[in-house]
Image: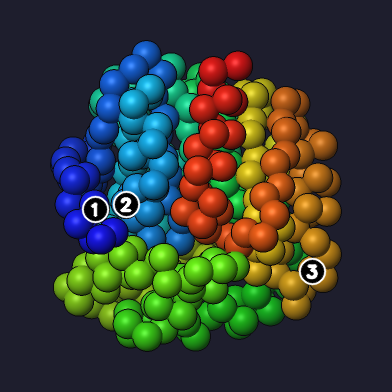
Amino acid sequence: MIKEHYNILQQQELKLSNGCKVSYIDEGKGAECILFIHGLATFGRSWYKNIESLKDKYRCIAIDLPGNGYSDKGDYPYGVHFYAACVYDFMEIMGLKKVTLCGHSMGGQIAMTLLLNAPEAAHKLVLCAPAGFEQFNAFEKNMYRSAIGFADFFSNNESNLRKSIHSSFFQNTHQADGIIEDLVAILKHYPTAAYKKMLDACVHSMMNEPVYDNLNKIKQPTLVIYGDRDALIPNKLIHPISTQQMALTAIKKMQNAKLEMIPMCGHFVQWEKATLVNTLIEHFIDN
């Protein structure tokens, strides 16, 4: 059923200034535009449940970052700053105005980096279980990379991919099977070494291109949403504190941010609790 719904979303293509062809979804109309940025190892269609609900009021655009989804998979300098520059270039070419950036996990860190580099790019910010709020010293960075290293995420094996995405949910993990089916089909055409290289570069950059110390420079009104059962952020082996504790500490550094904790929900908050997340986003944009 989910797969049939996915077919409603039409992929379009645009060439960035660096020559990379990126695929994206563009649905709905409205004066306000929401630009969705996906997280590590996923793609724009991971926002399906949000686009289908929010497109009645807003223009909803979801980009496949280079090296992901249906976008080009060349030898690019993958990382947070690279992706932030790509998204900004995409916005410029598309001529997007009155934009709310909405990023999940790594996509949240990318969105924050983009606004730190180009504060005029968007007027509001939504962060769904964002990376970037958790800090790592040198020892912890090595521990983290060893923990997630070349185990589950760094594989195009279907069973490992399924396990990785399922771990992003607290309940009803099989609701992610539609996403997995699409990703597996894409990965069959993605050389294993190139895929691992891209993901390793992304994980490395999330820790080595931090935003935490500059959170106070983000002036946009910001909505931060986490699930209270997020098993990925923070890494409980390294930082045995609650997600809420970590998030509250971070948003105190920001000029105009508020936190919404969703009970009984994991890391893939925008999918697992889509109805509530959509309501929060709509209220945030309209007020």
Q: Residue at x 37, y 14 (%)?
A: 31
44 sits to left or right of 16: right
Task: Pick the residue in front: 101 or 159.
Answer: 159
Farthest top residue in view:
31
Rendered-image quadrant of the C terminus = top right
Q: Give the amino acid at mark 3.
A: His
| Element marked by disc 2 | helix
Which residue is tagged 2?
45
Say whether residue 111 is visible: no
136 sits to left or right of 172: right
Task: Pick the residue in front: 197 or 284.
Answer: 284
Q: Which residue is drawn at 54% across and 18% down?
A: 286
Which residue is tagged 3?
239
165 sits to left or right of 9: right
Rendered-image quadrant of the N terminus = bottom left
Farthest front residue in view:
1
**Measured from the top left, where is residue 146 in percent x and y?**
61, 82
Residue at mark 2 to residue at mark 3: CA–CA distance: 31 Å
| Element marked by disc 3 | loop
Cβ atoms under marks 2 and 3 closer than 8 Å: no
Task: Pick the residue in front: 257 or 79.
Answer: 257
Q: Residue at x 51, y 57 (%)?
A: 272
Earlier-in-chain disc, 2 versus 1: 1
**Measured from the top left, where is residue 244 in percent x and y?**
78, 53
Task: Pick the residue in front: 66 or 18.
Answer: 66
The vertical placement of 111 against 233, above or below, is above
Q: Give the amino acid at mark 1.
A: Tyr
Q: Give the amino acid at mark 2.
A: Arg
Q: Which of marks 2 and 3 is in front?
A: 2
Which residue is tagged 1?
6
Earlier-in-chain disc, 1 versus 3: 1
